[in-house]
Image: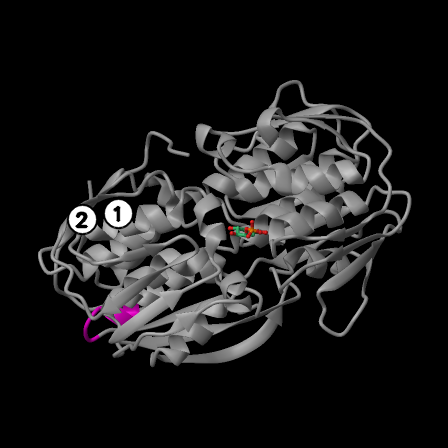
Amino acid sequence: MITDDRQDKFRLRPGGSLRGTLSVPGDKSISHRAVMLASIAGGTSYIRNWLAAGDTEATLGAMLDLGADIERHEDTALTIHGGELREASQPLNLMNAGTGIRLLAGIMVGQPFPSVLDGSVQLRRRPMERITAPLREMGADIIAANDACPLRIQPAQLHGIEYDMPIASGQVKSAVLLAGLFADSPTTVSQPGPARDHTERMLRSMGVNITEDDETGNCLTIHPNGALKPLNITVPGDFSSAAFLLVAGLLVPDSELTIRGVNLNPTRTGLLDVLGEMGSDITLSNVASQAGEPVGDIRVKTSALHGIEIGGETVVRMIDEFPILMVAATQAEGETVVREARELRVKETDRIAVMAAELRKLGAIIDEREDGFRIVGPQSLTGGQVDGHDDHRIAMSLTIAGMIAAEGAVVTDVACAADSFPGFAETLIASGAKLLPE
Ligand code: S3P
């Protein structure tokens, strides 16, 4: 969502190179989960490097409305005294946060009081049937016109189910697992592919028994077993934010960037595998464990890329990185083809259609397909004015595209970058980008 003190337009000038050592704000997925789970844990949690961004602030606001006892030391350091939630006096406003509303729904269906979960016009357009269907199967009482938010939830006794997820989705898996905490019997979730696993990692670290029913790790059972232990974590840097800097470092001539402390959870780093196969010069170092997640430094140097075909499990492991991959594909030699990525059409925007339309304004030729796209490169981007459509990942991807456009570019509706990456423009400027916020 847009707040009034944010710049809403970037002007990009051609030229310059990107150099230096940077960091990115805390992981958005982990920050949502941390504030929700710490609020219902038994005891006091300490969360450092929490992401203070549009989406996660919406979740934090909702938890405060639910009576959570949250102390804020700096924007990014939280002390949360966990306990029972209580009925909010107003609908919970998750703004643009799809993760916020879908995960919180999993918790709210297990509460002994009613709640209403709502959000922005953009969020009201996003599909909720994917969570309401399994939650209702567990016994949840949810009323939602057209299966969109607002979601009106009444208290109900939940029962464990065996749920075969029709799509690989971290949000759906998490909503069911979280509801499983409040069920009177174990809940099993089978996913068709490896969707992000932050919820399982965090719940296990809080003492919850989650078993894997086979060696693929795609079938999980949660056994509800009482109060959650509190968290004491430093949230790792968000790989999905680092992805914009990574691709900028690859495409802008004569660049070399090191991004420190980035989450390298393999359910998130499909883009690293893809860029590696495309010929990029990327190296990882200082890999260690932090907050139950693998974390490390990523160094990237300007590289000549070639096209690639992407489909299947890789799609899920890089679902948020396709807008920026499209920019990389315009610069890669040969054909890049993406299949089985229909999910992109139900993100904050229809990311296939919106990216194709906006990149065309910069002179690109994009072949849009129902479940992906085909781009033949290298293409020279000329320049022009493009729009971020209140979708943070679109706005940031177009900013990077503008940096390599021969005549530069203007990107409007970019304030939404702060939904996940506050300081995006400042970070680029500090590393040498010719970016003027207006
Ligand atoms: C997220 C899961 C993904 C991703 C979103 C964050 C999460 O959505 O696109 O940005 O934190 O669980 P889906 O699970 O719907 O694919």
> Which residue: 68% across, 29% down?
66
In the rendered image, the vertical position of residue 302 relative to residue 152, given as above or below: below
Dot 2 corresponds to which residue? 361
Q: Position of residue 129 (x, y in %)?
A: 63, 37
Residue 132 in magenta? Answer: no
> Which residue: 28% across, 77% down?
305
Say whether residue 53 is left or right of residue 383.
right
Q: Nearer the viewer, residue 44 or 118?
A: 118
Say whether residue 115 is left or right of residue 17.
right
Report whether residue 208 is seen. no
In the rendered image, the vertical position of residue 210 relative to residue 148, given as above or below: below
In the rendered image, the vertical position of residue 231 relative to residue 376, given as above or below: above
Q: Are marks 2 and 1 in contact (CB under 8 Å)?
A: yes
What's the image's color scheme?
Answer: one colour
Q: Position of residue 274 (x, y in %)?
A: 42, 73
Q: Which residues are magenta?
A: 249-254
Dot 1 corresponds to which residue? 357
